[in-house]
Image (cartoon, helix red, strand yellow):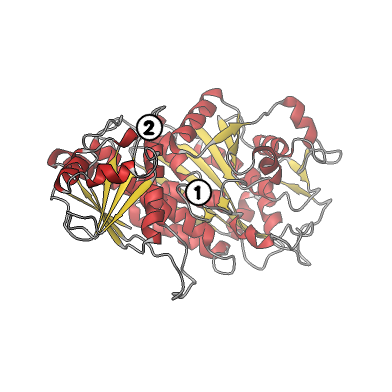
Amino acid sequence: MRVEITAAPVPETGVLVVPVGREGALSTAAAALDARSGGLLRRALAATGGPPKHGELVELLLPAGLPQERILLLALGKPEGTRLLDLEEAGGALAQRLAALRSARAHLASPAGLDLPEPPARVALALATGCRLRAWRFTKYQHERPDEPKGRIEELVLHLEEEAAEAARAALPGEAARVAGVLEARELVSEPANVLDPPTFAQACRRLERLGVEVEILDKDRLEALGMRALLAVAQGSAKPPFVVVMRWRGAAREKPLALVGKGVCFDTGGISIKPAQGMEEMKFDMAGAAAVVGTLHALAARKARADVVGVVGLVENMPSGTAQRPGDIVRAMSGKTIEVINTDAEGRLVLADVCWYTQDRFAPEAMIDLATLTGACIVALGHERAGLFASDERLAGRLLAAGEATGELLWRLPLGKAYEQHIKSEVADFKNVGRAREAGATAGAVFIQQFTNGVPWAHLDIAGTAWTSRDLPLCAKGATGFGVRLLDRLVAEHHEEPGPVG
């Protein structure tokens, strides 16, 4: 979806979206239209049976006294306070209505004159961002269906006063970069596993080179030379070779980079410990952690973030075959520690064991954050509303929680600790790859990964419940969410970026 910014007056044809405030308050643009139509807008708002709530739309079709074919009054403002995230979600509601109306193009009148905590430029851009995020759908493999009742908004024109238009134009590239990063992650997660296998995913990462990201692909021979036997053990049942991809954005000269690590299991059958058939098709999104890392690097590079960030993803398939690893096998990780494989379906932590160790060993990062669709136990604990956060560092945990609240990519902190390390103690190796039956399964996975972080300030985000949605969300239709991109971009912007103009 394209966003255009102009200081020109609103057009007299097409679909016009006009912001209004709480309790029916009119923006400057709404008041002018109301006067021109003899009070039509106020009458329409009064006829709804009460002031419209934030994000609700009141439609005027062929409004008397006005030239536009259709006017949508978009209510903005919450009694308890209106955040930028609330405005984005209102933009998401607008995208849904425009899709239902099959409107490919719409014009948004200025929100100037409304009692909102943000200036008109930021309000308009937040609405446009929400509209873009909610309008996205994965239709690559669908032919057009004549009976499909919904369309898609393709262009939103923001009509602002000259000063506000100038401010919006300056901020638009940064906003567009963040959205592009989310959509990149969603596209990757949505691809079927027969299309996006480890070799294809590795090559897809090279698209970041166009934005100035350094991309290095480590093939199977290199992984064997490095001693990544835990990762290789997961991959050995598949005909598709594994890869580790290193991506670095050097937007600033820092002594130590921030490191982002992603689990990239392009398809997870469970291996020899095979999953039930029902729902296994969803295991194409077991690489959502890696996709979030790629999307974040895309966003940072596209907005020229003044930060030094490295992203490392481990790409494998977990397949059953005559060469697959077995329950009871013992593998030696890159760190030298040995792992007893109790369940081959607990494979993501084996991948991350080697990738996290490699990342801290090579880059000595300021902090390291891994993202993984790791455990069903996290979904049992938190549902699909929040991702699990595990952290060895209090400051890092607090920053991630705050970034999640600001972006709507919510986290909930779960425990680590010495007592939980007993859950992964093996009788025949240094560790085993599962905990105690149904006890603290998400924590068992996290505390396992922690053993391979070597004391670096570290956080683990278990995004099993948030990487994919089976129902429509305010900023996302059913399917891949791109969870983690906006969260991490916000973290970088607030805590890992050099001072300078806002991007």
Residue that numbered label 2 is attached to: 82
Q: Is 285 in front, or is 350? A: 285
Horizontal side of 91 relative to 282 (left or right) equals left
Q: Is 346 in front, or is 376? A: 376
Viewer can see residue 231 = yes
Question: Secondary structure under badge 1?
Answer: loop
Q: Position of residue 400 (x, y in %)?
A: 50, 32
Q: Type of residue at label 2?
A: Thr
Q: Quadrant of the C terminus?
A: top left
Q: Position of residue 79 (x, y in %)?
A: 39, 28
Q: Type of residue at label 1?
A: Leu
Q: Which residue is at 76% across, 42% downward?
A: 338
Q: Which residue is at 46% across, 69% downward?
A: 140
Viewer can see residue 175 = no
Q: Is 10 in front, or is 25? A: 25
Q: Position of residue 69 (x, y in %)?
A: 24, 60
Question: Secondary structure under badge 2?
Answer: loop
Q: Which residue is at 36% across, 61% downward?
A: 101
Q: Is residue 141 above or below residue 178?
A: below
Disc on the earlier residue, 1 or 2: 2
Horizontal side of 304 relative to 195 (left or right) equals left
Q: Residues within 10 Å of mark 2 (few under 14, many from 20)?
A: some
Q: Is 455 in front, or is 436? A: 436
The residues tagged by marks 1 and 2 sit, at their Cα atoms, a distance apart of 19 Å
Q: Residues within 10 Å of mark 1 (few under 14, many from 20)?
A: some
Residue that numbered label 1 is attached to: 473
